Image: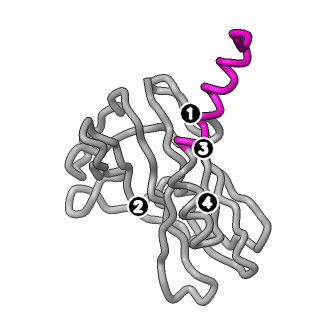
Amino acid sequence: MLPEKHIRLIQTMIIILFLCRPFLVVFAQTGVMVLTDRAEYQTGEKINIKMTNHQGKIIFSHIGGETAVFCIQHIEKKNTGGKWKRLFAQCQTPHCIYDIDAPREIKSGKTESMMWSPLIFVNGTSRTMQPVPGVYRLLIRYEDNQKSEWKSVYTNQFIIH
């Protein structure tokens, strides 16, 4: 029989592999890696998000800029049936109009990061709410090196308690 601490370690490793599985598939396809600093957070806690460029060429993203939240295309929450529901990370037009800075250059092998204060903009309006407890992921946008096409990559899944 394994000691209790070994059993807990094995359980933790299984959870980490389960949470990172979608990220591993996306990373293999795009060469852009986006991770949160932890797998679990308390409601209202800020989340550190890092984007690393492994494409071998420059990409562009808002993630390191003054208006970093605009790198988040949308928030997704896993429902009880295992399907993902899309939620808004920003107020949408016509409810709000923004002055957004230009995307920043991220060279190959470099990382940019942001601190995200999780807020959901209800139906894309200016009304906000804290995320309810559950499993989440973010879809993060970046531009290719020709600045001709916006692409997206998912973060790892994370839990908000």
- Image coordinates of residue 75 in percent, x first then y, are 38, 50
- From the image, tell me which residue sits under label 4: 65
Report the residue at 41% width, 36% height from top.
135
Q: Residue 147 at x, y = what percent?
A: 56, 85
- Which coloring applies here? one colour
Q: Are marks 1 and 2 in contact (CB under 8 Å)?
A: no
Q: Hey, what amino acid is under mark 3?
A: Thr
Q: Which residue is mark 3?
A: 36
Any mark on residue 73, and which?
2
Where 119 falls versus 26 (above or below)? Answer: above
Apparent side of residue 131 relative to residue 85 in the rendered image (left or right): right
Q: Quadrant of the C terminus?
A: top left
C-alpha gap between disc 3 and disc 1: 15 Å
**x 53%, y 42%: residue:** 19
Marks 4 and 2 sit apart, C-alpha to C-alpha, by 15 Å
Q: Secondary structure at mark 3?
A: strand
Q: Nearer the viewer, mark 3 or mark 1?
A: 1
Q: Residue at x 72, y 81 (%)?
A: 57
The furthest residue to the front: 1
Label 4 CA crowd tier, 10 Å (few <14, some 14–19, many 20+): some
**Residue range corresponding to the magenta coloring:** 1-19
Q: Earlier in the sequence, mark 3 or mark 1?
A: 1
Q: Position of residue 148 (x, y in %)?
A: 51, 89
Name the amino acid type tagged 2: Gln
Give how far across and how far down residue 153 sits, in percent. 51, 64
Q: CA distance from mark 1 to mark 2?
A: 26 Å
Marks 3 and 2: in contact by CB < 8 Å? no
Residue 150 as seen in the image, left or right of residue 114: left
Q: Please report whichever mark, 4 or 1, sits nearer to the chain's N-terminal start.
A: 1
Discs 3, 1 touching: Cβ within 8 Å: no
Q: Nearer the viewer, residue 87 or 69?
A: 87
Q: Main secondary structure of the magenta part?
A: helix
